[in-house]
């Protein structure tokens, strides 16, 4: 009998940049890469569609996402944990200023 192989779950850390759909987030992941010829470090960005079952994430939160089965045509990631919350104080200050006008 063969021993069961454990799957390696791919994880990434990124920032939530969009929340327009129900249970779907847009997460931007940045990575550093060296140019093959010039050896300069380049920042590469990619946006992933992520499934958020509890809908706890807000724009600006830093989240850890992990690969999962396909949820839809483009959604193959889900939120594993919220690493850091976005500052909510700035949003509340902007709302208060709008009420005074």
Image (cartoon, helix red, strand yellow):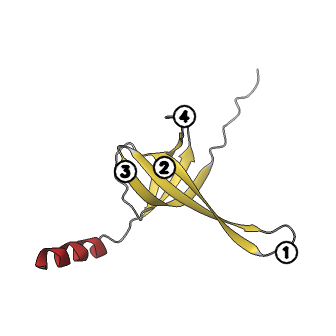
Residue of label 2: 80
Query: Mark 2 and mark 3 in contact (Cβ < 8 Å)?
Result: no
Q: How far apart are the alpha carbons under marks 4 and 3?
A: 20 Å
Q: How crowded is mark 4: few (under 14 residues within 10 Å), some or many (20 or more)?
A: few
Q: Is residue 4 above or below residue 82?
A: above
Q: Residue 20 carries which label?
A: 3
Q: Which residue is located at x 45 percent, y 60 percent?
A: 17
Q: How far apart are the alpha carbons under marks 1 and 2?
A: 36 Å
Q: How far apart are the alpha carbons under marks 2 and 4?
A: 16 Å
Numbered disc in front, either 4 or 3: 3
Query: Nearer the N terminus, badge 1 or badge 2?
Result: 1
Query: Nearer the N terminus, badge 3 or badge 2?
Result: 3
Query: Nearer the N terminus, badge 1 or badge 4?
Result: 1
Query: Nearer the N terminus, badge 4 or badge 3?
Result: 3
Provide residue 27's location: percent of width, then percent of height.
50, 56
Q: Which residue is located at x 28 percent, y 71 percent?
A: 91
Q: Residue 70 carries which label?
A: 4
Would residue 94 be found to the left or right of residue 81 on screen?
Answer: left
Q: Residues within 10 Å of mark 1 (few under 14, many from 20)?
A: few
Q: Residue 38 carries which label?
A: 1
In what quadrant of the picture does the N terminus appear?
top right
């Amino acid at each position: 009998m063969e021993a069961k192989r454990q799957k390696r779950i791919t994880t990434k850390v990124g920032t939530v940049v969009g929340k327009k759909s129900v249970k779907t987030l847009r997460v931007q992941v940045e990575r550093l890469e060296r140019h093959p010829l010039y050896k300069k470090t380049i920042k590469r960005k990619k946006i992933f569609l992520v499934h958020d079952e509890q809908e706890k994430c807000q724009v600006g939160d830093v989240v850890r996402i992990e690969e999962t089965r396909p949820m839809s045509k483009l959604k193959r990631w889900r939120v594993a944990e919220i690493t850091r919350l976005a500052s909510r104080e700035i949003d509340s200050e902007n709302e208060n200023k709008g009420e005074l006008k």
